[in-house]
Image (cartoon, rainbow, N blue to C red):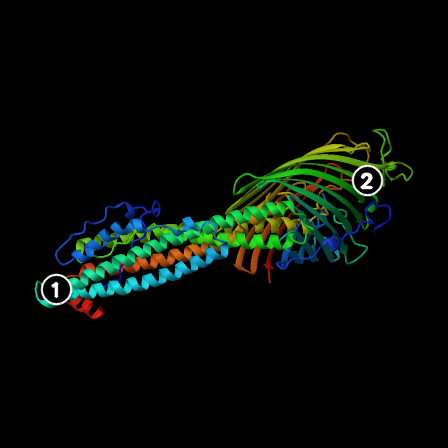
Amino acid sequence: MPPRFQRLPSAAPRPRLRVSPFRPRPPARVGARSWPRALAPLALLLLSPALAPIAAHAQSLTIPEYRELILSSEGTLARLERDLQAANARLDRLVAEKQAAGSSRGARSRELAAEIVEVSQRVADLERQRRAALADQAALREALNQRYTQLIDVNLARLDSLPQSDSAYGPLLLETGRIIGARDSLQLQIRIQQTLGSFRDFPILDSDGPAEIREKAGFYRDYVHDVAQRIAAIDREIGTIRERDRVASRMKELQEDLAFQGEDVAKRPTDASGGDIREDPARGAPIGIDLLNQSPERRIADLEEEKRSLQLLRGRFEARVREYEDRARTIYTPQATQSGEENR
Amino acid sequence: MIDSRRPLRSVVLLVGLSAAGAAPAAAQVHWENDVHMSYEYDDNVAETVVDEVHARVARISLRSDLVWDDSTTQQLSLLYQGGFKSYFDVGPQPLDISNQWLNEGQAGYSRRFGENQLRVSGGIKDRTWADEDFFFVNEDGFTRLWAGATYRRTLSPSLTAEADMVFSGIDFDHVDEFFGYGEQAGRLGAAKRLSEQVVGDVYYSIEQRTYDGRAKLRGPDDDPANISAPDRPRQIDLSNEVGIGVAVLGGFGFQARYRFRLNDSNSFGFDYYSHILNIQIAQQLPWRMFVQFYGNVELRKFSETVAGLAGTLDVEDTDNNVVVLRLLKEINGHMDVEARYGYYRNQSIDLNAFYNKHTYSLGFRVRP
């Protein structure tokens, strides 16, 4: 039985998706055997008002407190995902057992039905908690981002007012640089999380036949395509940055070589863009601008990190496509049933 | 030979070191080295209008660039370049061409003060023929000293303005009497990033050159031989120049600069104006190859003619009209091979005469 995907907050942005997010979800066929699973989304929907972000009361927290809360929320999320996986596995076993029992009205069958209801509620509860934790984490990250920005603004204003001879200047400058670096990393995490959140999950329902499963495999295939496109766009951007640097270096190299081997032309202390083609007007910028400018190396590092996340995601979607296609092909074969039961 | 007549001889070249304050812990040191070797065929090594001499030339050069940066407000850079050139298979007439050494050192120190940046720098460049008695008129041994300062102010994240001044002087080993000079120059400029890939700049500069070995010529009837008269005022040229440049950088690189230069001399026959266009293009090719074009064209017009004067005594950049093509292949991240072709049509020592010169070279570059 494939592990179920957790549904991500519906508020997450989805404009990046080419096909899948805008396709209507396949209608769930609610049958006698699958009703507990079919009710799970409904339960989630009913419980959703309870998802209150905690950041609203956390505006006065310090940066270390925010960091601690985010770490704590990451731990909570990991625990919830483990519990959810275990509960889903248990639910799968119970449903399979009930299916095997057929339409028997014996005591065991009633026990199974009751257990299915109980575990379904547990799954729904865990899903709700997970969504709430995700929302909290997003809100905390956003609040921390704002807190960083406020602090950076304050520090930059202080740096502007302090003479460089002041003993506080150097430490404050270094601290500000560190905070800007931390904010850049946080913003990258937020962006990656938003990207991940833009994809929905399509779990196989017990009521799904081969056609529905293939259709869901098609949704994941679209996701693979979308993610691959984004990865390709990142590769292009990295390539552009590297190309620019290489081309500028080669031009500068030839210029310098000709100048050195050639005639005795007077040097300038600095030549604007004529002397060094890599010169940037922002070079020599005031501290604030200079600190906030992302170097090409840093930009490439960020893009590489985003790319790694997307590659992992693409791998998951590709695995899901293969899994769903296999499932659609073998769903009604005895081997599949046997194999599925062995896996359980 | 450096003598006391030059106003710049006392300039201290290694500057600013004492200005370095306490360095924060995040200081970084970058040290880059580059060795370049080439074998070249030159069809006019003496750069003459007639009786051209061709030769094969082997070159080796080293560039070592050391930069210390405290990541906050200070930067110190030291650069050394050294080169050696040897001639073979000289023809069509046998000629024993001496080997040549080139050495250059530069030092610079930058410090930032809020929105302002100050940089002081200086350097020395020396070209020496191994045989002290040997020289070409267009390629004499020399020693140049220079020092200067730049003030730059950031007006916005993409716009800077700068002012610089430089003092410079050059002494030639054999032709210093007519070509050596001292120079003071100043410049105002602004550079703006127009888009992610485009940077533009404009500048105005003023420059004064004093030729200690040359006397002032008084008019069209003056005997040109009086240029060597010791009791006359020295020749002083004042030139004004405006320039505009643009650089576009992506997978394709383009840099162009136009300069207009107006030279006003106190000596008859040396007033002129120039239109100078410089273009560089670089394009990446498949298989880690690059093709590059470098071109310079100068249209210079002297407003007066000195009858009977043997030469223009022009010491301006000899790269008046140049085309260089380079094809480069990156073997790996540390080694390149390259083929280069150059065509030069430059002002010769003779008035209004240009020499032609073609060079073909193969070389490789190693960056350890």
**Residue B50 visible within the image:** no
Residue at 7% in and 64% down: A105
Task: Give the x, y percent position of residue B281.
Answer: 56, 44
With A129 as the anchor, is A172 left or right in this view?
right
Crowding near the residue tagged with mark 2, few <14, some 14–19, many ≥20 C-alpha atoms within 10 Å: many
Type of residue at label 2? Answer: Thr
Looking at the image, is mark 2 or mark 1 nearer the viewer? 1
Task: Give the x, y percent position of residue A242.
Answer: 51, 52
Residue hosting label 2? B210
Task: Give the x, y percent position of residue B31.
Answer: 63, 59
Q: Are marks 2 and 1 on the same chain?
A: no
Q: Nearer the viewer, residue A301 or B261?
A: A301
Q: Are marks 2 and 1 in contact (CB under 8 Å)?
A: no
Q: Nearer the viewer, residue B218 or B19?
A: B19
Q: Give the secondary structure at mark 2.
A: strand
Residue at 78% in and 51% down: B143
Q: Quadrant of residue B130?
A: bottom right
Mark count? 2
Cα distance between the residues tagged 2 and 1: 109 Å
Residue at 80% in and 43% down: B182
With B309 as the anchor, is A319 left or right in this view?
left
Type of residue at label 1? Answer: Arg
Q: Nearer the viewer, residue A48 or B284?
A: A48
Mark 1 belongs to chain: A
**Residue A124 visible within the image:** yes
With A232 as the anchor, is B154 left or right in this view?
right
- Image quarter of the C terminus of chain B: bottom right
Residue hosting label 1? A110
Mark 2 belongs to chain: B
Task: Give the x, y percent position of residue B79.
Answer: 69, 55
Q: Give the secondary structure at mark 1.
A: helix
